Image (cartoon, grey):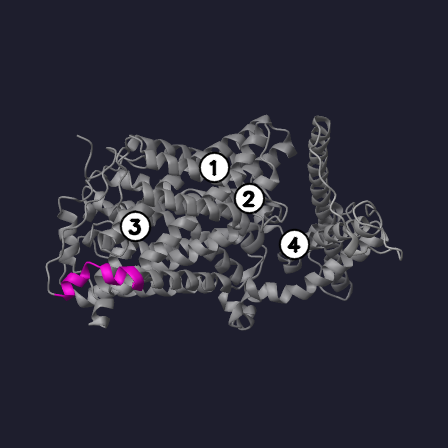
Amino acid sequence: MFWNRLFATKTLEMLDAEAKGENRLKRVLGPIGLTSLGVGAIIGAGIFVITGRVAANDAGPAVLLSFMVAGIACALAAFCYAEFASMAPVAGSAYTYAYATIGELLAWIIGWDLILEYAMSAATVAAVWSNYLNELLGALGLWKVPDYLCSDPFSNPDAWFNLPAVLILLAVTTVLVIGIRESAASNTALVLLKLFVVVFVILMGIGYVKSSNWFGIPAEGRKQTEQLLIPKLAHEHVDLERDLMKKAEQWSKKFVDKPVDSVTAHPTGGPDKTLVRAVPTKPLSEEAKKDEKLAKKEEAKAAHEAAERAKKRVTMLGDQAMATFISGLAADYKKRVADGETENEKTTEHWTMMLERYKDKHPKTAEDKEIVASILADARKEAPKKAAENWGMIGQLGINTKLAVIDDGTRNNFMPYGFSGIMVGAALVFFAFIGFDSISTHSEEAVKPMRDVPFGIMASLGICTVLYILVAGVITGMVSYYDIDVKAAIASAFRIQAENTGSTVLKYAGALIAAGALAGMTSVLLITFLSQARIFLAMARDGLMPQNIFGAVHDKFKTPHISTMLTGAFMSVVAAFTPIAKLEEMVNIGTLFAFTVVCAAVLILRIKRPEAPRPFRCPLVYFVAPAGIIVNVTLMFFLPADTWWRLVIWLGIGMVIYFSFGFRHSVMRHVEAGERLPPSEPLPPGPTSWPEAGIQHPHPPT
């Protein structure tokens, strides 16, 4: 019975009954509304940030191919999502599909995984939001948020936490707790704004595209592994210098500038601890208090100035190390040419340009030369390990050594990082596509789910894939891929062109793009929160989550306030202190895992219930579903090994919660006992609609 319970499945008839029950969500979304919802959820941090980072560090101009690979992986899963969503148009997405095919335990795992996906996605978008806020403020010539309040302490050791990310998440949480009455026009307006910005980027930027940035940069010009390590190692060296100075200062205060009135002097010159007397403290005078306050201000000012000096020192050492490394690469090329290797005109031109760029940045003192040599030695030592990490789990398994020959055979000017660069890039830009999953979480609200949900999924995915490829082409064509600003790629590309050309139009274009990105990412946060709420509600409906927490409704605002506040608080902490790159990887592996399960679930159901009505049938399912599994699992293996461990830990926590609560409270317990299912818990009442697409609730105010 125990095993039967773990793998108990909900029948399609049960799902159909849920979809027709009187407490279900009201069906108000048509094909345009669902497509708008999907586009609104997809276009966000992915297109505005990840495009630039992957192009700069992982794929080069071939990031276009990375988007194609990721788009194919999503399309294979999308066909499977569409079939299932038309068969079971209820809230819950992949969680519900798994419950109907492979059992309660795996359904819980997928539901818990989706919670991770949406939580990390929101935290990532919020962290990126702060970068574009500073781009906008800078473009307008206003005060910018200091670096120490605009980054996590792991990416920037001098940072405290990411304050703008926390503020935007708290604002979104407050809005959703209080509840706002808006129609579908709210989401449509935000989607149109984002689409306008994206189309503006394409049309405005295409005039500044240089084909030489795609095909004219030799493969040797890609960022070497050592170059990726230099900034980190320069920072570590400066941290050591600062620690050494602090310890020297402490030693000096203790043994040189030691106050003589704090202890009784010993005849031998050392302190006699047995004769130390407590000095009675006197209340400070007003003047002394002012002096103390002034001293604290001076101390804080000195600390800030020291941090700024350290930051400049890091930049200087990084530039010096980079200049020395580039000079070495150029010298190696010249030596190969001198030894008889055929000279390549573009390669020679590239190294000449790079030497000119770094000619004034070489170390000038003997001390700095010694430090730079040490940094480069450490970079060369760490490079093999870092290179293996770039292959993700494949590198950890040692398979990369056998695939390296493929890289060498596919590497060219357009694909400087070879085959692995495209695949690693695809695994990372996959983050940009996850929004279409939110359409399936809203299946229960589709007017005609058999028609509208498949249309919304495929239309939004197709539109966004085309836009992503065009934007990636424009960005890598406007700026050499190794010069792309990885924090705010699109806005910074226009800013760089404005600085080079002196164009006022381009300057304010950067401000417009930053503003559009902020508005777009804010709408993504709203949709992400609401999609996650539907996962929580679906699991609470099945008894796997506590109803008094995830189904609790505020007496006044009529919203699921407890789950929303818990989610908002958790996301705020994560966004404040976690590196963006790690958040993206967690989202990607969670989403790829969910897509794999959906592809498997559709295949299983085709075999187990071939007679079941399928308003939308996945074409060539016995090819599409296995291909979806293979492609998505392959991309998972290109993600770093530590991302896999984080997923395992997260799932382990979920298993503890399931066996301590969900297993005992599941509604399927009644089925196993031969009892009638209890009536489904009503979903929380709320405003007539929520902001992302006019989604109406089952109990509008009367």
- Estimate the spatial distance between the alpha carbons at disc 2 and disc 1, rounded to whole Å: 12 Å
Magenta stretch contains residue 121: no
Residue 174, position as x, y percentages in the image: 38, 35
Which of marks 1 and 2 precedes in the sequence? 2
The amino acid at mark 3 is: Phe
Residue nearest the observer in this picture, 145 or 554: 554
The answer to whether 92 appears left or right of 130 in the picture is left
Q: Are marks 4 and 1 in contact (CB under 8 Å)?
A: no
The range drawn in magenta is: 659-673
- Estimate the spatial distance between the alpha carbons at disc 2 and disc 3, rounded to whole Å: 29 Å
To which residue does mark 3 refer? 536
Which of marks 2 and 4 precedes in the sequence? 2
Placement of the C terminus among the 4 image quadrants: top left
- Estimate the spatial distance between the alpha carbons at disc 1 and disc 3, rounded to whole Å: 24 Å
Q: Secondary structure at mark 2?
A: loop
The answer to whether 506 appears left or right of 665 in the picture is right
**Residue 440 appears in the figure:** no
To which residue does mark 4 refer? 232
Single out the mark in the foreground, 3 or 4: 3
Magenta stretch secondary structure, dominant: helix
Q: Secondary structure at mark 1?
A: helix
Count of labels in the image: 4
* In this view, 404 is above or below 309: below
Q: Residue at x 31, y 56 (%)?
A: 111
Residue 77, position as x, y percentages in the image: 32, 57
**Residue 638 appears in the figure:** yes
Residue 461, position as x, y percentages in the image: 35, 47
To which residue does mark 2 refer? 161
Single out the mark in the foreground, 4 or 1: 1
Q: Are marks 4 and 2 in contact (CB under 8 Å)?
A: no
To which residue does mark 1 refer? 167
Q: Are marks 2 and 1 in contact (CB under 8 Å)?
A: no
